[in-house]
Image (spheres, rainbow, N blue to C red):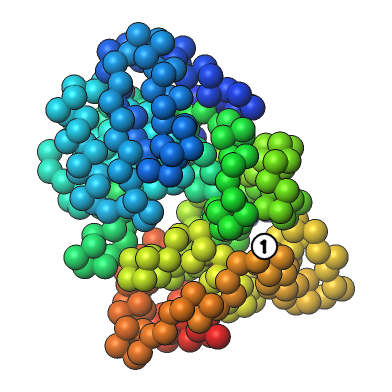
Amino acid sequence: MTVQSFSMRLSGRVLFGPGTVARLGDIARTFGAEKALVVSDPNVERLGHVNRVCELLQKAGIEVRAFAEVEPDPSVETADKAADVAKDFGAGLIVGIGGGSSLDIAKAASVLVTNPGGAASYQGLGLVKNAGLPKVLIPTTAGTGSEVTFTAVLIRKKEGIKAGINDEKLYADYAILDPELTLSLPPRATASTGMDAFIHAFEAYVGKSATPFSDIFAESAIKRVGRWLRVATWDGRNLEARCEMMLASYYGGAALANAGVGACHALSYPLGGIFGVPHGLANALLIPYVTRHSVMANPERYAKAAILLGRECGASLRDAALSCVEALEELVSDLGLPRTLKDLGIKTEEGRLREMVKGAMAVDRPMANNPRPFDEELCAKVYKEAMG
């Protein structure tokens, strides 16, 4: 075994189980806040989740204001607006409920209230000086793992650049993982967010920064996704599948937080920043192409990942590793997700392709963590293959 030094970190307390959102009021009271800002998006508000959370907080004696304006792939402007609302209201607690976009805005707003300047000035690593407001995060999808990571990914719309605020001050103080909140998620959203959870774990597992600690979470997440994502997608009322995928999402986020991700994430960012492709969908589309070019840089790990996905691997290490690509292609196909950029109606001329490559290469930490180093030529090759 290779001798390795590493650090370990998880977010604050976690409450898991069907119906656990009902305990929000008791949890919120522990922070001693008199006012709370609830951060979410219009769809989650339409489903009634925002109103329910507000009622739970009000019953606990906490004054509430809702900010349900988070868009898919949220912008720095939205983070700044949410923080301004929290400041004007005098919020002492942030509660985020929804998918990764809402949770990311909640995390960003919590530190923007206590630090000067706008969100764009903190995109990078370790740039936040002051601790943020306490935050409780409640995911309504099983995918992003945002409730356990220290990242808030935001788009600078004018530049078409997608980048993260990455700082330990963004870790949640409390996460409530209630699988019942995901029962109404439609198949396409279930599949794409589930693939996001998978790719967090998968890239953390095969990446250069993997540790024995991150492997515990990554292996569990990969195995759960391989077993349960198809079921959750096509039988959405199956509570067991929803529970297993909620755990997979949390474990994938924990793996990501401790070992990072890889080139697939870097390549997906321009698809979101330039074309507005949802993050999970972009990752799911790209992962077979990225893996095909990365697999021989760490064949043992890819072979193990294939086994975790349920593949019966060939006799040789090479065949076993390559079977991982086949497993990924089958998974994306079984979920009914797009296989090519053409399926999404995306056509790119040479100038736009160069812009995509430049954007991907700028996401340097995931690129550096990928088993095989990616340069501009390889990025362009993957994009072209993904065109279909």
Q: Residue at x 32, y 83 (%)?
A: 352
Q: Percent position (x, y) of residue 97? A: 43, 35
Q: Percent position (x, y) of residue 152? A: 35, 47
Q: Residue at x 87, y 73 (%)?
A: 315
Quarter of the figure with residue 87: top left
For this view, does 66 lie left or right of residue 196? Answer: left
Q: Percent position (x, y) of residue 83? A: 21, 36
Which type of secondary structure does the marked residue at label 1 adopt? loop
Specify few, some or many for label 1: CA neighbours under 10 Å numbering under 14, 14-19, or 20 or more: many
Q: Is residue 123 visible?
A: yes
Q: Residue at x 80, y 59 (%)?
A: 310
Residue assigned mark 1: 335
71, 170: nearer the viewer: 71
Marker count (numbered): 1
For this view, does 378 lie left or right of residue 85? Answer: right
Q: Percent position (x, y) of residue 189? A: 55, 54
The residue sitting at the bottom extreme is 350
Quarter of the figure with residue 335: bottom right
Quarter of the image with the C terminus in it: bottom right
Q: Is residue 150 visible?
A: no
188, 213: nearer the viewer: 188
Q: Residue at x 38, y 54 (%)?
A: 72
Looking at the rendered structure, the kind of residue marked 1 is Leu
